[in-house]
Amino acid sequence: EPEVTQTPSHQVTQMGQEVILRCVPISNHLYFYWYRQILGQKVEFLVSFYNNEISEKSEIFDDQFSVERPDGSNFTLKIRSTKLEDSAMYFCASSLIGGYTFGSGTRLTVV
Amino acid sequence: QQQVKQSPQSLIVQKGGISIINCAYENTAFDYFPWYQQFPGKGPALLIAIRPDVSEKKEGRFTISFNKSAKQFSLHIMDSQPGDSATYFCAASIRYDKIIFGKGTRLHILP
């Protein structure tokens, strides 16, 4: 069964540093998403991406966040200057028409 | 209006029993209602989903009941097994766009 692959599985970073979280969506999917889940809490929408541009973003997705699809396969989330409260699981998802598939996530720990 | 309210927060059921998780929504524009199952350290995995033009959908031991007039839907897990122990999220979306998740129900099936 096709998978959404995320790397790294765990990232520890110093506060103020930049991090890039990487995702390889399912190859024929057209819609791409980032969600985050603070430990023990619900999964929150960050951003959706379609046709090489952001189609929607939440209020969480402020100027320190950016997304890119640098080539035909990768989809990245960049956090420019990490804060302690950015510590969370970050999930990438992709879909064709509905039927989201989520990756296993990257656990980001900001120290 | 974008919220999906989920209850209970946690649930303990005997093996073989029926697990019931309830959700409610306000936005009548929602047209897709998935349930996700999440195991520790993994991303949410689509379990079963329903559209508002049907009142019930069954897949194996999992059934969604949908009440459009009450704006409520529920997940029933029949013959609950220890392997069903996980966190369950109800969710809603509009035209397969971003998914709004409930806060989750931590289900524990006693052996």
Image (cartoon, helix red, strand yellow):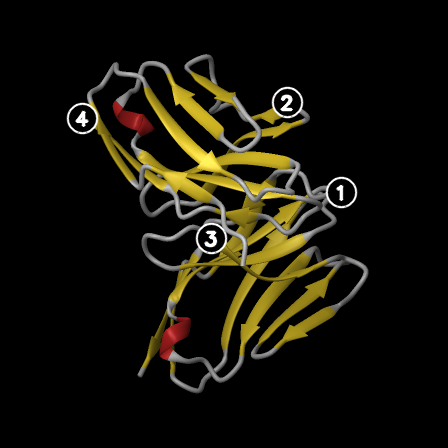
**Same chain check for tags 2 and 4:** yes
Q: Nearer the viewer, mark 2 or mark 4?
A: 2
Dot 1: element: loop
Instruction: Give me the C-alpha separation between circle 3 and circle 2.
Output: 25 Å
Label 2 chain ID:
A
Q: Residue at x 33, y 56 (%)?
A: B40
Checking the image for residue B91, the label placed there is: none
Q: Nearer the viewer, mark 1 or mark 2?
A: 2
Q: Amino acid at mark 2?
A: Asn
Total count of labels: 4
Residue A106 % position (x, y): 35, 39
**Residue beneath disc 2:** A52
Q: Amino acid at mark 3?
A: Pro
**Same chain check for tags 1 and 2:** no
Instruction: Single out the residue that lies furthest toward the bottom.
Output: B16
Q: Is residue A70 left or right of residue B11?
A: right
> Which one is earlier in the sequence, the residue at label 3 or at label 1?
1
The answer to whether residue B3 is seen in the rendering is no
- Say if A48 sits above or below B81 in the image: above
**Residue beneath disc 1:** B29
Specify the quadrant of the image occupied by residue A21.
top left
- Say if mark 3 contacts mark 2, CB within 8 Å: no
> Which one is earlier in the sequence, the residue at label 2 or at label 4?
2
Q: Is residue B13 left or right of residue B47?
A: left
Q: Residues within 10 Å of mark 3 (few under 14, many from 20)?
A: many
Q: Residue at x 71, y 42 (%)?
A: B94
**Residue beneath disc 4:** A111
Instruction: Give me the C-alpha separation between circle 2 and circle 4.
Output: 33 Å
The answer to whether residue B6 is seen in the rendering is yes
Dot 3: element: loop
Q: Nearer the viewer, mark 3 or mark 2?
A: 2
Checking the image for residue B44, the label placed there is: 3
